[in-house]
Amino acid sequence: MCIGWKGCHAAGFAWAVCFTLLLAASAIDWQTQLLPDVLTQALVWLGLLAASFGWTQLEVTQAVWGAATGYVSLWSVATAFRRITGKHGMGAGDFKLLAGLGAWLGPLALLPVVILASVSGAMVGLWLQSNQRLTEEGHVPFGPFLAIGGVVVAVIGIEPIAMWMNW
């Protein structure tokens, strides 16, 4: 907690830690295509704690459902993809990262986060491909784009994004 700093309080510090974890996870994923458990699990647990202390707009039950929905939704897509194609299309770190975002933002925010992540990731992937800058395997890590989608939804909110997408 920031004592004596005008406008600084526990909720602001908690969100700063959240954004710092997202930045660190994104940088590591971009370089290695790995999302360390120490960062993704910290994001989940800190999101749940932040909700329990009232530092987010969520009730604790919404944070729990957000974490569970985030994990299960990407796990389901990845499992279906693997069963259909026999290939791994996404790592478990992405499931955990979306679980963390769900703990901070709630289950209703996850669809806009994933849509923003998918669109921005596809745009960057196409740009990298057109400039022959893709890795040898041709993979673009999804974690940084999930983080970007999460930050956008956290800062802007769900309502303006939903209106922009005509929901």
Image: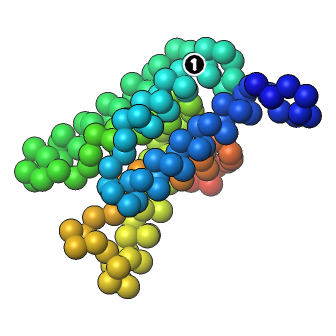
User: What residue does disc 1 label?
Assistant: 49
- Residue 85 seen from this side: yes
Q: Is residue 39 above or below residue 156?
A: above
**Quadrant into which the N terminus falls:** top right
Residue closer to the observer: 43 or 88: 43
Give left or right: position of 84 versus 123: left
Give left or right: position of 137 versus 23: left
The spot of residue 140 in percent (x, y) is 34, 63
The spot of residue 109 in percent (x, y) is 54, 37
Report which quarter residue 14 is drawn in: top right
Image point 62% across, 37% down: which residue?
17
Image point 57% across, 33% down: which residue?
105
Report which quarter residue 46 is drawn in: top right
- Residue 112 seen from this side: no
Q: How many marks?
A: 1
The spot of residue 11 in percent (x, y) is 72, 28
The three-letter amino acid code for the residue at tag 1 is Leu
Image point 32% across, 49% down: which residue?
34
Q: Is residue 27 above or below residue 110?
A: below
Residue closer to the observer: 128 or 111: 128
Residue closer to the observer: 21 or 75: 21
- Other residues around mark 1 within 10 Å, as few (<14) / some (14–19) / many (≥20): some
The spot of residue 6 in percent (x, y) is 92, 34
Give left or right: position of 129 versus 151: left
Image point 39% across, 25% down: which residue?
68
Say what secondary structure mark 1 lies in.
helix
